[in-house]
Amino acid sequence: MSTILEGVEDRPFIPTEYVVGLARTPWERAGYHALRREVFCTEQHVFAENDRDAIDEVAIPIIAACCIAGMPDRILGAVRIHEAEPGIWRGSRLAVHADHRKLGRIGAELIRMAVSTAHGFGATQFLAQVQEQNVLFFRRLHWKSLGTITLHGLPHHDMQADLERYPAHGQDQTWLLRPQPRNRQVA
């Protein structure tokens, strides 16, 4: 009997539903900051103890949360957007919990929500500074590189979203995701 359950405790819980939207409640904002700290401080060591900066004072936080029994339960994705100059918006601090990165859609949906929300606020240009290892992912999502830079000692690309691929929507928009398992073909 124990062989049937062997290794089960080591597998992360993978929910069947996620919601993506603006972080509005105190618990959503707390989870948003905790996830950023976990990814950028503990996991990647980009920052020592905290990744917060002056942009957080004006940024709009966007989160992805897993759902249990149809209710958001835990923050597992985060990104922030802000208007850097009139019409020019930026996204930054994109983070997805390590246990949920292989699902693929969470990061893409956070990006889509970020750009579409900024577009709804009147963005004429949307930019981000993207870590080198994520450039191909962003290119697949209709972004182009404007050049390379070094931030926090790491190679990044200045990148720009193709706004025509991201329809504008209002800030009240919330998306429900139901990731489908990938079926692998066996030869």
Image (cartoon, helix red, strand yellow):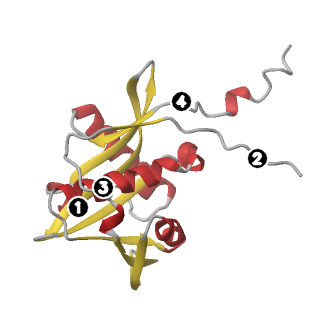
Q: Are marks 1 and 3 in contact (CB under 8 Å)?
A: no
Mark earlier in primary sequence (4, 1): 4
According to the picture, the residue beneath numbered tag 4 turns out to be 16
Q: Residue 32 location, x and y as percent?
A: 33, 44
Q: Residue 2 location, x and y as percent?
A: 84, 17
Q: Are marks 4 and 2 in contact (CB under 8 Å)?
A: no
Mark earlier in primary sequence (1, 2): 1
Mark earlier in primary sequence (3, 4): 4
| Kind of residue sitting beneath label 3 | Ala
* Disc 3/disc 4 C-alpha distance (Å): 22 Å
Is residue 133 placed above or below 19 in the rendered structure? below
* Disc 4/disc 1 C-alpha distance (Å): 34 Å
- Which label sits in the foreground, 1 or 3? 3
Q: Which mark is residue 180?
A: none
138 and 157: which is toward the camera: 138
According to the picture, the residue beneath numbered tag 2 turns out to be 184
Q: Which mark is residue 53?
A: 1
Q: Is residue 112 left or right of residue 84?
A: right
